[in-house]
Image (cartoon, rainbow, N blue to C red):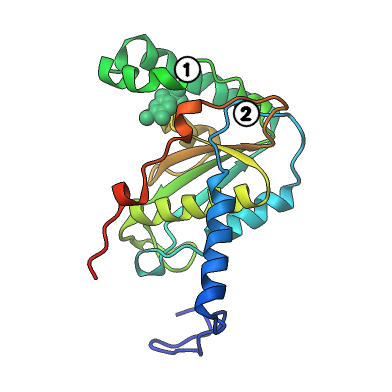
Amino acid sequence: MSNQYNDHDTVPLSGYDAVSDAQMLARVEAVRETLSTRRTIRDFSDRVVPRDVIETAIKTAGTAPSGANHQPWHFTAISNPDIKRQIRIAAEAEEAEFYGGRAPDEWLDALAPLGTDASKPFLETAPWLIAVFAQKRGGEQAGQDKKNYYVTESVGLATGMLITALHSAGLGTLTHTPAPMNFLRDICGRPKSEKPFVLLVVGHPAEGAHVPAHALIKKTLAEISDFLE
Ligand code: IYR
């Protein structure tokens, strides 16, 4: 092991202060309120976002739980206009095929209320794109080549935390998934062993941005949960 710990070493848990039931409820309600205003944004401002905000959001994502703590993710943050343009061109080519016949009617029907099409100008307008890659092999330390576990679950959890961090900072995001996304691996110079997971578009919402009204409607607590007490 090349870290400072031996196998089975433990350290005292920190970061969990004793919290009353009332405080707990107030805290979780505050988080619910913050996250309930998150909307998927497709209309971005070109306002510059400082790199250290993006770095801190990625660091936050990097604290996500993962199979055997292998942290099977890589984040490529792109603000370079030439690279954003390359990504837009490649994504729009995929989307043109998708909307032009590859997608089954049922899928296109499901997307109709969103009003999306093959045009993706936000890939150039937004100040940052974050390409998230999933690593089939890796390990607890960078540069290792061991089998990773629960890769999709782990990268999904990290991406959720990334979106949460960016929203908490006041930024808008779009979880963009042109399919297939292999072009991202080539443009970002990532190895074949990594699978593009999602392309996150990040920036301030454009002034006067609109979002689909129907997506405000969320399933109720009773519809998404049950309690076996
Ligand atoms: N990737 C396409 C299509 C698309 C698919 C789903 I599922 C969405 O929720 C939204 C869009 C696009 O980005 O337009």
For the N terminus, the image quarter is: bottom left
Apparent side of residue 77 relative to residue 197 in the rendered image (left or right): right
Looking at the rendered structure, which numbered label has been put on residue 115? 1
Work out whether residue 116 or residue 185 is closer to the camera in this orientation and state it: 116
Q: Residues within 10 Å of mark 1 (few under 14, many from 20)?
A: few
Which quarter of the rendered image does ligand 1 occupy? Answer: top left
Residue of label 2: 84
Q: Is mark 1 within 8 Å of ligand 1?
A: no
Q: Name the residue type under label 1.
A: Gly
* Quadrant of the rendered image containing residue 7: bottom left
Mark-to-mark CA distance, 1 and 2: 23 Å
Q: Which secondary structure, mark 1?
A: loop
Answer whether residue 161 is visible to the viewer in this image: yes
Residue sitting at x 33%, y 60%: 148
Work out whether residue 213 or residue 115 is closer to the camera in this orientation and state it: 213
For the C terminus, the image quarter is: bottom left
Q: Are marks 1 and 2 in contact (CB under 8 Å)?
A: no
Image coordinates of residue 220 in percent, x first then y, are: 37, 46
Image coordinates of residue 40 in percent, x first then y, are: 53, 35
Q: Residues within 10 Å of mark 2 (few under 14, many from 20)?
A: many
Q: Earlier in the sequence, mark 1 or mark 2?
A: 2
Vertical position of residue 45 compared to residue 119: above or below? below
Work out whether residue 94 or residue 220 is closer to the camera in this orientation and state it: 220
Q: Is mark 2 within 8 Å of ligand 1?
A: no
Vertical position of residue 156 compared to residue 90: above or below? below
Image coordinates of residue 10 in percent, x first then y, are: 45, 89
* Quadrant of the rendered image containing residue 96: top left
Work out whether residue 43 or residue 176 is closer to the camera in this orientation and state it: 43
Q: Name the residue type under label 2.
A: Lys
Answer whether residue 176 is visible to the viewer in this image: no
